[in-house]
Amino acid sequence: MDTQTPLSLNRPGEALALISWTFGFLPKNSLVVIGLDQGTTGGHLRVDLPAGAAQAPAENLSDFADSIAECLLGAGASPVPEAALVLLFAPEEAEPGQRPYGGMLEALKVSFATRGEAPIVHTWYVGGDRIRDYDCADRRCCGYPGLDVRREMDAVLQDHPLFAVQGRGRPRGGPVPAAQGPEAVVRWFESSPLETGMPTGEVLYSREEVQQLREDVAAHRKRFDSMAAQDGRPPYVCAAAWDAAISRTEVSGSAGWLAECPDQLAAMLTAVTDSGLRDAIIPMAALDFDTALCGYLVLSAGPRSGRHREKIAELLGREGRPAPGDLDAAVEDFQAAFLGDTGRRPDWARIDALEMVLRMAHAFGDAPARSHILSLMVWVEWARGRGSIAGAYADRCVERYPQNRLAQLLSRYMDVGGICPWAQVKQHSWSWSNYEQGKSVRKFLSGSGNEQSSSSVMAC
């Protein structure tokens, strides 16, 4: 089947394939809500199931339901979907005569109705490793506890291989078995991209060749580290190496070429071990190189550096870079990108390229470099709005490198509900950017017209 054939979300395997592709894994103990609009999906939300929600009455969950409705239908959700699909990923298997989470679903329907005409047109219940139509009481049609999740997924992925690799030439958490969860995404990132290719798995380099590549990078690394020690910070070429890598990877769709550039990789590893330049990689990807460089130079021109702010333009001029008329504005843009609060959509194509570059750099890095690279992946996934995967990266980074302050900071921020501002505005978000750039497979629904009706779309 052509990978462009739309998915029909009133079929269990195809709904699961969409969830796996969108979030990078199949969630557990989660409520997933997907907005539907004119045959496309837009607005994907995953939250943990509230404690006690299985048996709680609707009135006890009204605040929770209102928060979900605000995310999907509020001011930041424009264009607002006209309907919604719900999936319940619960620990309990479906049993005859029981409707767990019924109060929560009723509260959601009420909250959605008060914010506009956006009915919940279908609900899937995923309990354990089974999936069934939540609203179907006919055992002859939808037997209990339901269909096997893995079997349904495998059948769909054979016809839609695009969803098996999670993105068209763009990394979306890696080609890992969807049921394994966020931790498997992190394990995939940490696995070497040198010995096998993605997504086909062909052999790229022998073990002997990989060892030689690492030795070449290490040899060049000594030179750049020596330059950084003499100047007190990595030289300009180390920062420029990251920008060049991101730009080339964005165009080529792969960072595999970096393995043939040991001098560039060495410069990048020297840069990323400096916490200031590590932070500058974020606005470098999200905005542009000049904003990142200006912000880095200004913020590093403190009392300890001995540099005065008026020298920043001179430093930039030496490297042939333009000096902005307002350095304060450059710093504000730098910090806003770091916090995902620019008020406009970042350059998601460069951020996607950054993930590929980070994975290749991780394969060659020592412990200090890998620590900073993992913390940057926490930021990448947090910015995308994928908190579960960001949390898995943060846990891994803190577990291996407990002194990494960036991972600790982002982890604490996420714990108190710090959703990235970009993810809170649909048209600024990562998933929406795919549609705008024409690189999306957001058009999943079949053309029967039933998916846009006000009545429930039944799979049976």
Image (cartoon, helix red, strand yellow):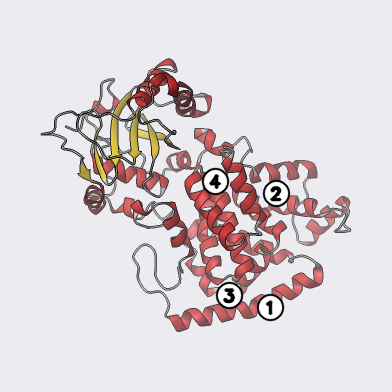
Percent from the top left, x then y, of residue 134?
25, 31
Tags 2 and 1 touching, CB below 8 Å: no
Residue 388 visible? The answer is: yes
Quickly name the residue at label 1.
Answer: 222
> What residue is pinned by disc 2?
291
Nearer-N-terminus badge (3/4): 3
Q: Position of residue 419 (x, y in %)?
A: 56, 38
Label 3 sits on residue: 262
Q: Which residue is mark 4?
A: 382
SS at badge 2: helix
Q: Is residue 67 above or below residue 167?
A: above
Above or below 220: residue 406: above
The residue located at (22%, 35%) in the rendering is 95
Q: Amino acid at mark 3?
A: Pro
Q: Are the residues flagged by discs 1 and 4 in contact, CB closer than 8 Å? A: no
The spot of residue 122 in percent (x, y) is 28, 29
User: Which callout, 1 or 4, points at the residue further toward the start of the chain?
Assistant: 1
Badge nearest the viewer, 3 or 1: 1
Place of residue 361 in the rendered image (x, y in percent of width and height, measured from the top left): 56, 66
User: Helix or strand or loop: what does disc 3 sit on?
Assistant: helix
Q: Nearer the viewer, residue 333 or 50?
A: 50
Q: Are marks 3 and 2 in contact (CB under 8 Å)?
A: no
